[in-house]
Image (cartoon, coloured by chain):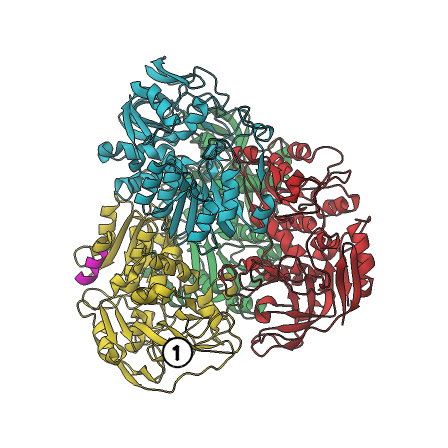
Chain colours: A red, B cyan, C green, D yellow
Amino acid sequence: MKAVVFHGPRDVRVERVPDPVVEAPTDVIIKITTTSICGSDLHMYEGRTGLEPGRVLGHENLGEIVEIGGAVQQLRVGDRVSVPFNISCGYCRNCERGRTAYCITTNPGGTGAAFGFDGLGSYNGGQAEFLRVPHGDFNCLELPRERALKELDYVMCADVFATGYHATELAGVRPGESVVVFGAGPVGLMATYAAIIKGADRVMTVDRHSDRLRLVEEMGAFPIDDRKAPPTEQVLDLTDGEGADRGCECVGYQAHDPDGIEHPNTTMNNLIGSVKPTGRFGVVGLFVPRDPGAIDEIAKRGEMLFDFGAFWWKGQSMGTGQCNVKAYNRYLRDLIASDRARPSFVVSHELPLDDAEEAYRNFDAREHGWTKVVMHP
Amino acid sequence: MKAVVFHGPRDVRVERVPDPVVEAPTDVIIKITTTSICGSDLHMYEGRTGLEPGRVLGHENLGEIVEIGGAVQQLRVGDRVSVPFNISCGYCRNCERGRTAYCITTNPGGTGAAFGFDGLGSYNGGQAEFLRVPHGDFNCLELPRERALKELDYVMCADVFATGYHATELAGVRPGESVVVFGAGPVGLMATYAAIIKGADRVMTVDRHSDRLRLVEEMGAFPIDDRKAPPTEQVLDLTDGEGADRGCECVGYQAHDPDGIEHPNTTMNNLIGSVKPTGRFGVVGLFVPRDPGAIDEIAKRGEMLFDFGAFWWKGQSMGTGQCNVKAYNRYLRDLIASDRARPSFVVSHELPLDDAEEAYRNFDAREHGWTKVVMHP
Amino acid sequence: MKAVVFHGPRDVRVERVPDPVVEAPTDVIIKITTTSICGSDLHMYEGRTGLEPGRVLGHENLGEIVEIGGAVQQLRVGDRVSVPFNISCGYCRNCERGRTAYCITTNPGGTGAAFGFDGLGSYNGGQAEFLRVPHGDFNCLELPRERALKELDYVMCADVFATGYHATELAGVRPGESVVVFGAGPVGLMATYAAIIKGADRVMTVDRHSDRLRLVEEMGAFPIDDRKAPPTEQVLDLTDGEGADRGCECVGYQAHDPDGIEHPNTTMNNLIGSVKPTGRFGVVGLFVPRDPGAIDEIAKRGEMLFDFGAFWWKGQSMGTGQCNVKAYNRYLRDLIASDRARPSFVVSHELPLDDAEEAYRNFDAREHGWTKVVMHP
Amino acid sequence: MKAVVFHGPRDVRVERVPDPVVEAPTDVIIKITTTSICGSDLHMYEGRTGLEPGRVLGHENLGEIVEIGGAVQQLRVGDRVSVPFNISCGYCRNCERGRTAYCITTNPGGTGAAFGFDGLGSYNGGQAEFLRVPHGDFNCLELPRERALKELDYVMCADVFATGYHATELAGVRPGESVVVFGAGPVGLMATYAAIIKGADRVMTVDRHSDRLRLVEEMGAFPIDDRKAPPTEQVLDLTDGEGADRGCECVGYQAHDPDGIEHPNTTMNNLIGSVKPTGRFGVVGLFVPRDPGAIDEIAKRGEMLFDFGAFWWKGQSMGTGQCNVKAYNRYLRDLIASDRARPSFVVSHELPLDDAEEAYRNFDAREHGWTKVVMHP
């Protein structure tokens, strides 16, 4: 089959690889109909992770079941499903508590597995014609029959819509509260959208790309351009000097200033300053324990100069980590089915899988208007 | 009246000061019968805060009401009460949500007030014969009639028992879970005790003072001596290599190694290593936004070299800050009244107020056996 | 001053009564600018409670502070405030936990107090020119300066908007879930509205008055007319036979069938049938421990023939009771201030206080189009 | 193999039946080493359910794995496991949220499945030499190697210890709170024990059997003998007239008075009276939608004369239903392993499986001292 294969920094190629097969009786094989490129793919694309060449990328996947293992009990060939980026067993200590991003059994020696992702097992991804999904009954979410017209929406349930929503859950956003979101990439836009869906009062989203800030404004949130003034100041101005009730980090370790210099602590320390005492953060931007390609020794060791004194004095709290997609995807699917949510507004490009190389190049360069790329094999 | 007055670094004096008076109609005046010295008093005693000379110290107070303002409605002269270290109004945005440590009205220009505490308003403390308590109806907790014999227990409800309990609440400790506590000072001992009361399975408490570690062991918890091996290793050994479910930080910014060199990030980074993926920390040790007396530039600015990459990769979370004493003190009082809790086991010295100078000196020096000092005026 | 005084069943009169005065130093007096009639006023109006003649009615109040007691610390004469229907002290065991509807001190011998309400203290209400508000600092919510044009919205924060919201909180409504609401009176409409604000997926609201069902539809919810088919059947039809995730009871003990015969158990038993296994109900319609005017002996004793076996077998749960208005009113106020919520859509009539007698008569008769009456003294 | 087979009211027989076999690749077969008789078995034994003759009883099971299906991934032959009474798939909407007692797939046409239980699928139970466990990876809990001496403790994790614990979770018991438990059968004793483990302050347990009340007292709880005075009165006396913070129902629909007359509403209405306003109940005693053998028409229809008016006026709430054993059994196992919990104190008789007929007879008759029977095949 055709697949997007990682060969090294800024080198992905659409090429032929063997078709996946059922390896365990609980596996299913799906024919991918829609798959997208995630911001976290770019960390791998840029060579800022340890991903080995040869792996198929792609963890935002939607498709049709074409084969099922002998122990699969609920799914049938022909079912159309959205597949969470996490690969989870469903029965370990973490899965049974809903922490499916931290499955203990699917990534031996680690915690948590994902499709096409460095450090989360050696599974191939779904930027390809077919995908093997372990523990099919647990990991596939059935889509309604009438979904045909909404495939771009449903594919967002595999990661970015769920991850943006997760940011607001970790932050504890409740109706009537104010929220600051750092980052208006796809995840930050989805966190903004999730906060609005939940009835947040004032959502303020920080970025510096005018195309993304425009999407923020169109949602009814407040775009904050950090090139114009420090974002903390702008948030304090919008909140009578008190700060936001909640904050979301949707940027991750490659945060950089307008000149492109990386400062991994920028967004976290800005959250401390722009959120109220007793406020809470949800941190879903990716941070890594070791970052050999980083700008200085501190960052190389995965450390951060964190304003811990101010954080503690304000009595703030935070939750972090990968999204447990299954905690949310049924509900997000239902909101899409009933037209209450249309997350596909974030999609800027819909391309054939064959254009993946160019898509990666443009998305990575943050070319104007390249907000989110969806591909069809 | 006689009171313990701060004059400068390592200089407190028992001297005469004017009696407090009712200033607002919601005030009450209590005659102090028991007051204790808290570990956080030592930060001020050592000159590691900006406390101005002349202030009366003491935020762990218990006594009898001798005068009430005209608007006090529930309390009567003669009632015996435990007084939380926080001074709170009861009606601001934070108080009405139970976040009484972050009261907006009692510390104009800041958030949160306390008796005899730098940075939390200019209120005098209760290491004295009398104490003015603002918002008496809200801030005083009535004690049962038979409390006479348990005054040493009830005074712990003013701070350390509540704060140790708060650590376990912030960490989300539940029955059957394992917990690691950093620090076996009074707060760490109380966090250990609270975890046991809550039905935690395995509680492991890290310190290096043999008198404190002995108290840990007597409670049925696991003492971990960090002079013998890295505490993270010891915790992993006790938990099949998995780490604890929850962690409590009860040391604060003056954490130091066995040679006395300060490393403010020691306990936090050890928590990351010794707690499981998806685990949660409660951080009640004091950290400050600026620390002019610190050992290096990073610490002077209140920053910390924090292993954020590992923290995020493990999907950990944390809550921090001062204890909202009123959230717990009724329940802790009731557990004492029914003999289910006896926190006074932590008290090593019961002295007259006149001995305060020596008590501060010995407690600050961590003289062997000086775990907790209680004084009677 | 002029006030709406209860004289007996279906007999309220606008007449002159003495002005309220500051009785305790924590009291404030407000000049009422907007007050409304609540569905629960009708229980009293109809003589279905033990309310004594002579009491001023009215617990949905908004106005301007004209006098403050000597111990009031935050409010100033001239402040405009929304006043929760509950009268609470702020410092008792229940108030400090946010359960302000169950204050222990303001209704001696009972639990919970309210303005102009039988069984909840002997306080006069605010369908009058002036109102005494005890514990002013705790019970008054300041309104933003620009509120002039939104007084009809803000007055809803005193009860019905908060109570409808409370129903969804008790029921645990979360984004993407389906909700059935019994009753489309003002509280049921507000519960419907609150569920939508919170991001519920499918909200189905049961009533039989076409004017109310039209408002349900205009919000984007599903109107269910219980004259056409059993509401349980209709809900199951709309939810693939599974039932709703959550349910809200917004009718109370005077529930009746289309022929006007009372069946106090109708809505509760319909909830059991129309909500999924493990689903949860929020019950905010008023039920009373004794109802001498009821149709049969069971109801007179405040009992109900409840399908407990089915409720248990489905593993359902429920929360009940009066709304703790202060738990929500800040947030609802902010949503109104930022135009994210406009609850005044429920108001059908805006009248001078002098028209109160006619307003009660028409509202009680459920005259077509009399959804909600707001009055200005 | 030998098994305890239901033949009709008060007629169970130990007889030979075919061995269970692996039917689905996710099945495991365990050799039962310990199994017990539960109070809910008695409803079936007495003929008060619709259980068809021929079914093997027994839902509290512990044993050793002797065969595994081809899709089982974590378990190995020889593992010793505790088996929850619920049979759950792990991947349906309810299982993935931890509501394993309400699995949607294992009981087609219903919700929730269990071993040897009427209305919860047609699965055989484990009062036998062997048991087939569907979805083995999900439903089996591994026991520590040293469990040999504690098999009587670990078997309690299959139902009664977990169910008693569930009662306290549904009721929301927190440290320092008071709790009233109705029923001191095995489940009520375990609810009492769970409340104590959680740090409850005062636990009061109502029964009338002196052997059971003695066990209550030995735990440090307050035994309440309902033959001496109305239990509500006794609870109010022990709580300064205020009532308990929380309540647990551990009796179920066959509640009866000291003369043996059934009143299914006794315990629920007593809870309303003996729990504080805003208090919460956990109801784990079994109630059924239809009870043809009941004493009157109301009970036959599964209805109850419930004091709903008082319940609502007090703002009480409740959770109900079967225990989701997997939510707790890991933690309870760990507490047993570390000797912090020894639930086997409830076991009065340890017998060979061959004595099952006599055991049922005596346990059903509530013969003095027959608190809990454990059997070994």
Please tell me which residue is depicted at 27% across the width and 61% down the height of the picture. D183
- Pick whichever, D22 or A214, lies toward us: D22
In the image, is residue B244 part of the stretch drawn in magenta? no
- Pick whichever, C286 or A246, lies toward us: A246
Indicate the quadrant where residue D223 lies. bottom left
In the image, is residue D212 part of the stretch drawn in magenta? yes
Left or right: D234 as drawn, with respect to B229: left
Q: Is residue B280 above or below residue B32?
A: below
Indicate the quadrant where residue B332 lies. top left
How packed mark 1 is, by other alpha carbons closer than 10 Å (few <14, some 14-19, many 20 or more), is many
- Pick whichever, B314 or D49, lies toward us: B314
Can you give x and y, in whole percent of width and height, for residue A195 in the image? 63, 48
Q: Is residue C304 above or below residue C35?
A: below
**Secondary structure beneath label 1:** strand
Left or right: A45 as drawn, with respect to B178: right
- Count the numbered circles shown: 1
Which residue does the numbered mark 1 point to in the structure image?
D131
Can you give x and y, in whole percent of width and height, for residue D4 in the image? 31, 81
Kindly report the secondary structure that dominates the magenta region of the rendered protein: helix
Q: Is residue A218 visible?
A: yes
Q: Which residues are magenta?
A: D209-216
Amino acid type indicated by mark 1? Leu
| Quadrant of the rendering where the N terminus of chain D is positioned | bottom left
Q: Chain of mark 1?
A: D
